[in-house]
Amino acid sequence: TATIGGQTKINDNTSSSTAATGALTVSGGAGIGENLNVGASLKVNGNTSSTNATTGALVVTGGVGIGENLNVTGTSTLTGKVAIATTS
């Protein structure tokens, strides 16, 4: 067990293409107590199916803001109010 206090920087720019590559790799889980900022793409490689709002490879407890396109393959289930706004 290592306890590191203060800001910690990893000055390595090794790219990541899988969960086992990159400047920092963690073989177990990772707990993050505050914000996580990703400077490029975020890819979730899990393939857990979703049957409701609390299951699946990616589960978001709060709202989701999407600044551009949303592409969905498979069945979409919307529960609650749905508002569709158009812009010209």
Image (cartoon, helix red, strand yellow):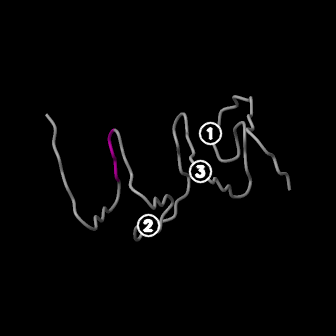
**Dot 2 surroundings within 10 Å: few (below 14), some, or many (20 or more)?**
few
Q: Disc 3 or 1, which lies upstream in sequence?
A: 1
Q: Amino acid at mark 3?
A: Glu
Residue furthest toward the left?
A: 88
Looking at the rendering, in which quadrant would you find the C terminus?
A: top left
Please give left or right for residue 36 compared with residue 24 in the image: left
Q: Disc 2 or 3, which lies upstream in sequence?
A: 3
Q: Where residue 21 sits in the image (x, y, percent)?
A: 70, 41
Q: Please give the name of the residue rendered at 16% of the width and 42% of the height, measured from the top-left corner.
A: 86
Q: Where residue 20 sits in the image (x, y, percent)?
A: 70, 46
Range covered by the magenta-colored residues: 68-72
Please give left or right for residue 75 compared with residue 38 in the image: left
Quadrant position of residue 53: bottom left
Q: CA distance from mark 2 to mark 3?
A: 26 Å
Q: Nearer the viewer, mark 2 or mark 3?
A: 3
Disc 3 target residue:
34
Disc 2 target residue:
50
Residue 17: give its label. Answer: 1
Secondary structure of the residue carrying tag 1 is loop
**Dot 3 surroundings within 10 Å: few (below 14), some, or many (20 or more)?**
few
Quadrant position of residue 79: bottom left
Viewer-proximal residue, 56 or 33? 33
Viewer-proximal residue, 54 or 57? 54
Residue furthest toward the right?
A: 1
